[in-house]
Image (tube, rainbow, N blue to C red):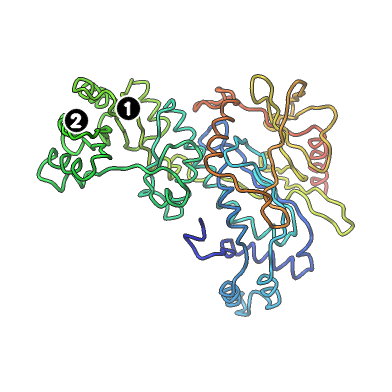
Amino acid sequence: MLSELYRSPLALLTDLYQLTMAYGYWKLGRAEQEAVFHLFFRKPPFAGGYAVTAGLGTVLEFLDAYRFEDTDIAYLESLTGNDDRPLFDREFLDHLKNLRLTVDIDAMPEGTVAFGQEPLLRVRGPILQCQLLETPLLNMINFQTLIATQAVRICSATGGEPVLEFGLRRAQGIDGGLAASRAAYIGGCAATSNVLAGKLYGIPVRGTHAHSWIMSFDSEVQAFESYAQVMPNNCVFLVDTYDTLEGVQRAVAVGRQLRERGHKMVGIRLDSGDLAHLSIEARKILDEAGFPDAVIVASNDLDERAIESLKRQDAAISVWGVGTRLATAYSQPALGGVYKMGAIRHSDGSWQPKIKVSEQGVKTTIPGTLQVRRFIDERGYVGDMIFDDTHEPDARGIVVDLKDTRHLEKITSPARFTDLLQPVLRGGGLAGPVTDLATARQRVCQQLQQLSPAVQRFNNPDSYLVGMDIGLHERREEMIQAAGQS
């Protein structure tokens, strides 16, 4: 889909400092030295208990086409340092021009429930290549994971009633709108107003008319009649341009005309005012007029908390249109995902785990080549263990809680497990078919059924156990102490 929107490939979709570091590795003869990097977020968004991964399909499309074109090289050749001399040697630019990815990437499939500090992606390969991929991977995974998570929360608030994503007009640009529509669909939205997203991703599209249609006629009833005449199979009437409940009565009158012509009024839409009161009164009017199947669509700055409030007020809304607060992740504009080195390989073939130590404990990284193991029993998900893939998990079977290292949890049988990071790229080539959006949507539903409702609640969610294999924890503690003495 990227190739239908932008010129392809997009190798310059990166920060300059990734290229300067890549140049440094090349200049020092280290371009092919193997390294391992992990992409993760430190805490779930929206003060929630979890996130839902999205964006991997976009990443794989980007990587499959990755290369530097002649115009990219010409642009990089024009860059200068503070002495006005070329920033990069021509030989380095030739290296980029001939570069083809050889990295291995393992990732959580799209639609996976994930938690803070867990790698969503693991990238292994030549350090120059790993470095160049940091910015685009974060760009694509951060935003779509954020929007998919928001969509899940909104869809859960409606109790299964359909959510329509209406965010394109308020989204951050063309790509922001398309990425938001894609991620919102993974997160459970039933359809989008974004027609281009419908074409590119196969998402159902919905929409009828706006206030401007009503205002272009001499009367509201004339506007409804005219719309019913030109589009009798798509009639959801927007009733709040003037007096909302009078608008419902006029919609009913036109609905009767439609019925006489063998068509059906689908419903009405409310876009302002006291949505709880107006929907209840509108429902009475529709039912008494013989339209019990007509839906009431509501929009107007909705999010999961507004929807929860309306549900508590017994609002008679059956379809929810959510725009700005979904497509822009209004309450939290960024996920805060990061990309950190976990290990580097020496010339003798040995791997050296790497750690970043910080006075902020949450910013001290986990060293190694990491994998995430999820334990499951008859109740659902028990907890996740992060371990080093180059070591067998410690035989003691103990998980050290990342939130409180004094808390040790022993995983006992009959818990089953699955390792979440799956091969998606091997030697720079796709390791298998890319997951389609329908499968990702289904994965979200299946995984949420296994996750405690207490972890899913919006206010003060319970903590889900995420910890380190005790052997990895002990090695990490030794590295932290050694770093303090160096």
Q: Name the residue under label 2.
A: 248
Residue at image location 41% in from the left, 52% down from the top = 196
Most distant residue in the bottom direction = 85
Tell me the kind of residue under disc 1. Answer: Ile
Residue nearest the viewer, comparing 165 with 473: 165
> In the displayed structure, does residue 288 sit left or right of residue 65?
left
Where residue 219 appears, as percent x and y from the top left, is 11, 41
Q: Where is residue 344 in the image (x, y as percent from the top left)?
A: 79, 53
Tell me which residue sits at (77%, 21%) in the image.
413
Q: Which of 121 and 252 is in front in this view?
A: 252
Would you say 342 lies left or right of 222 here? right
Q: Residue furthest right?
A: 348
SS label for mark 2: helix
Residue 257 placement (x, y as % from top left): 16, 33
Task: State whether residue 320 is above or below residue 211.
Answer: above
Q: Is residue 211 left or right of residue 97?
A: left
Badge number at residue 317:
1
**Front residue of 127 and 259:** 259
Relative to 108, residue 127 above or below? below
Q: Which amino acid does label 2 sit on?
A: Val
Q: Which residue is drawn at 65% across and 72% down?
A: 97
Query: Which corner quadrant of the image does residue 155 belong to?
Result: top left
* Residue 403 falls in image quadrant: top right
Res. 318 in view: yes
The mark nearer the N terminus, 1 or 2, is: 2
**Looking at the picture, how far across and down is residue 129, in whole percent?**
69, 60
* Numbered tag placed on residue 100 in the rendering: none
